[in-house]
Amino acid sequence: MILTLGVNAAVFCICWKQIMGGKNDFPVFYSNAQMVHEGQASRLYDVEAENSFVRRVSDGDRAPNNHLPYELLIFLPFARLRFGAAYMLWTLLGLAMLGGVAQLTRNIWPAESRFGPIFLAILAFFPVWYCLLQGQDSILLLFLFALSFWLWRQRREDAAGFVLALGLFRPQLVLPFVLVTFLGGKWRFVRGFVPGAALVSLLSLQVVGIHGMTDYARILMLQGTQGSARTLAEQWQVRPGLMPTLRGLLWIVLPSSATTRIRSLLLLSVTLAALLWTARRMRSARDEATFNLIFALAVTVVTLVSFHSFIHDFSLMILPLLTAASGLAWSEPITETRAYSIVTVAFLFFLTPLYLVLLFTDKVGLFVLPTVAFLWLMSSWRMGSLGALSARRSPAEPTPILPV
């Protein structure tokens, strides 16, 4: 982990000059916040107006913004700073949120683990550093998922749902997870999510107005189809092969002769099957250890089937990895073959050179394969054994974590 952390930090330092030149994604958030600060929020989804602000700090145009505008309220204080200072402050805030994730996940272990090793594991995960390098907001989403997970484990399901709704700036990751909880019969979580979703919608409307929200819906419709992928790739260098998702894998492995209809049908059918399978598993979660594992399964599936996600969004996978490690501590002794399988697959997730090779070759979608292997290994653990161990940990009968 220490060696991997060193490699990640080296990659960050090598890219530092380009980062300060605005060659990453942070200029989009920074310039959008400046538009709000200067009273131009209603033109936020006007591509030419948006890029006129981006050009103040970066060369070249960027793809249309596809985030709900309420998120820019977080970035407003950064718009008052110079670009370099704003980026460094956002990076420090990201590191603080990663520390928060480590703190929130300490108590998923049978004996509460130390903060240091967990924080080290998080920093050794390359997608986290890639998010810092790009100045992206995926670490904020990771923190919200971790906080929601912690609240849910405290039996505060309504609060957990409300907190996750604050992550709707990335609906492609939040909404599938909420769908799983709905189909899994977790009504209290959904009940808390609804007012949170209403709040961020009202805040967004307040920021950009009705005209701005109409433009936002139009942008989503344009980007939310398989047919738009080629246009995004040609005009804005948004390449599906860089997505560590099912969509990215299909883009890589299917021949160019495959029609958009075939690609969409495959993507939709596998996505629905995966979400229904996860929801069925979630209905079976009663005790603490089993719930931890089901949560990890749900986050992994959501990450796999997300329609529009890149390596920085893959930072969300650190939660299932930490939870799986704690699951091994809960479970009964396993065979040597299975132990080696788990360690080998987990090692791939922390292999920074593998990410770099796949990035430079536009083959990041191939990372779906070890993710599916990891998902299979987790789903094959005996739920009964985990539940029994949870019961043995406390002489009292297991308290249902997820009331139906």
Image (spheres, grey):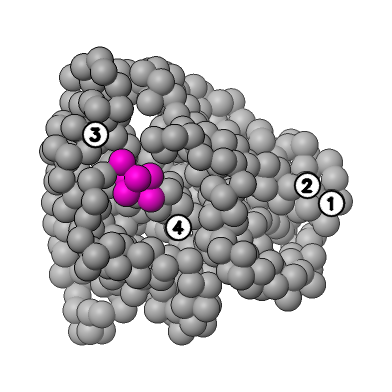
Mark 4 in CB contact with mark 1 (< 8 angstroms): no
Callout 2 touching callout 1 (CB < 8 Å): yes
- Position of 101 relative to 242 (above/below): above
| Of the image marks 4 and 1, the number of the one nearer the N terminus | 1
State the residue position of label 4: 314
Q: Earlier in the sequence, mark 4 or mark 2?
A: 2
Which kind of residue does numbered mark 1 sit on? Ala
Dot 1 alpha-carbon crowd within 10 angstroms: few under 14, some 14 to 19, many 20 or more: few
Q: Which quadrant holds the C terminus?
A: top left
Q: Secondary structure at mark 1?
A: helix
Q: Which mark is residue 36?
A: none
Kindly identify the amino acid type of the residue bearing the numbered disc 3: Leu
Name the residue: 31% across, 57% down: 304
Identify the residue under disc 1: 85
Numbered circle sitting on residue 89: 2
Callout in the foreground (3, 1): 3
Q: Which residues are magenta?
A: 325-330
Give how far across and how far down residue 346 sits, in percent. 38, 63
Which residue is labeled 3 in the image? 389
Q: Secondary structure at mark 3?
A: helix
Is 339 positioned to the left or the right of 318 in the image?
left
Question: Upstream in the sequence, badge 3 or badge 1?
Answer: 1
Q: CA distance from mark 2 to mark 1?
A: 6 Å
